[in-house]
Image (cartoon, rainbow, N blue to C red):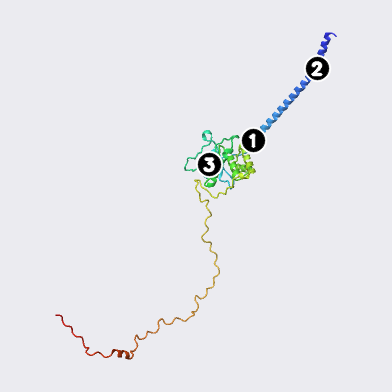
């Protein structure tokens, strides 16, 4: 065969093979494009879901009406605890009204962006402070702050001479976390119970994600080993005034009347019998008997025996002789 024919056959073979290769490549390209479109659709859905979640969170936050003032824990055993923020720690009038004497400050020192202990050096307020320095971020470790916080709260409870304010900057995360941990450890509250109590006292109470995880871990640890709980504290039985000294408590009811109303008079009682019955004995006789008899009776006859003894007088016995005068 001529050379030209051989070349034509080879070319025609290549031409026949190329369409197959091109067809495979086109299919792969189409599949890649489809995958890319699916990925884009997936990313778009994820983006939409993320936006929806963010929107829901914002709506939830918007629905929460924030308390402007510190809140008292509404529990009969824990009503001596208040939760608030920096503004509450500065409000002297509110502190005195709530009988606050102890302040647990859950922020760093002021030079590091924390809240100052406003009345620490004010002798008239008689405030006692404890600072547990911590930042409001999920990486902070609560475990290292539990012991100091619990010891301070226990001191305030045992002394029974005032209430406690637990505060951070906003009164949302750090202060709430310390309050919850104390309730769980000493009053055996569950995580959910402690969270509900804090939300009732402070509507914006919401520990950050890291704190929430650590508090739930504490809950599981306590539940799995009840020996880790502290003994249940007794109820506080006194009411205290702002300066920390025991007060007499609320005034009791006024003393009733010394004497009740006079009732109607009953029927007259019959007269009592005679004061004294007839004398059982006759009247006493004359006060004095007959006069005493004669002092001396009549003279009796002379005693003969005495006369015999005396006998007659001796002779020569005459009158006494006169005494001779001295020379």
Residue 172, visible in the rendered structure = no
Label 1: which secondary element: helix
Q: Nearer the viewer, residue 119 or 54?
A: 119
The answer to whether marks 1 and 3 mark residues whose Cβ atoms lie closer than 8 Å is no
Q: Position of residue 45 (x, y in %)?
A: 70, 30
Indicate which disc residue 103 carries. 3
Label 2: which secondary element: helix
Which of marks 3 and 1 precedes in the sequence?
Answer: 1
38 in relation to 199, above or below: above
Q: Residue furthest right?
A: 1
**Cα–Cα span, label 2 and label 3:** 87 Å
**Cα–Cα span, label 1 and label 3:** 32 Å
Indicate which disc residue 17 carries. 2
**Cα–Cα span, label 2 and label 1:** 60 Å
Q: Residues within 10 Å of mark 1 (few under 14, many from 20)?
A: few
Q: Nearer the viewer, residue 309 or 302?
A: 309
Quarter-of-image position of residue 212: top right
Residue picked out by circle 1: 57
Residue drawn 83% across the image and 11% down it: 6
Which of marks 1 and 2 precedes in the sequence?
Answer: 2
């Amino acid at each position: 065969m001529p050379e030209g024919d051989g070349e034509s056959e080879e070319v025609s073979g290549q031409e026949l093979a190329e369409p197959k290769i091109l067809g495979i490549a086109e299919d792969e390209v189409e599949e890649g494009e489809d995958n890319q479109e699916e990925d884009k659709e997936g990313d778009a859905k994820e983006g939409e879901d993320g936006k929806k979640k963010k929107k829901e969170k914002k709506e939830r936050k918007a629905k929460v009406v924030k308390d402007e003032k510190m809140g008292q824990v509404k529990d009969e055993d824990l009503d001596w605890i208040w939760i608030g923020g920096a503004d509450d720690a500065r409000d002297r009038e509110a502190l005195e009204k709530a009988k606050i004497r102890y302040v647990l400050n859950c922020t760093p020192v002021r030079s590091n962006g924390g809240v100052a202990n406003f009345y620490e050096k004010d002798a008239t307020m008689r405030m006692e402070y404890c600072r547990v320095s911590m930042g409001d971020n999920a990486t902070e470790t609560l475990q290292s702050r539990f012991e100091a916080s619990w010891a301070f709260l226990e001191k305030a409870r045992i002394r029974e001479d005032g209430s406690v304010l637990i505060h951070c900057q906003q009164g949302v995360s750090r202060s709430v976390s310390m309050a919850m941990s104390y309730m769980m450890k000493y009053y055996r509250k569950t995580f959910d119970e402690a969270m509900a109590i804090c939300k009732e006292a402070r509507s914006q109470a919401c520990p950050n994600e890291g704190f929430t995880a650590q508090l739930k871990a504490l809950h599981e640890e306590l539940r799995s080993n009840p020996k880790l709980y502290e003994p249940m504290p007794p109820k506080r039985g006194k009411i205290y005034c702002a300066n920390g000294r025991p007060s007499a408590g609320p005034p009791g009811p006024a003393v009733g009347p010394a004497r009740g109303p006079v009732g109607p008079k009953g029927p007259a009682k019959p007269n009592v019998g005679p004061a004294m019955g007839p004398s059982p004995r006759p009247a006493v006789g004359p006060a004095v008997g007959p006069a005493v008899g004669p002092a001396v009776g009549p003279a009796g006859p002379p005693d003969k025996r005495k006369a015999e003894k005396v006998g007659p007088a001796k002779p020569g016995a005459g009158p006494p002789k006169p005494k001779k005068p001295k020379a």
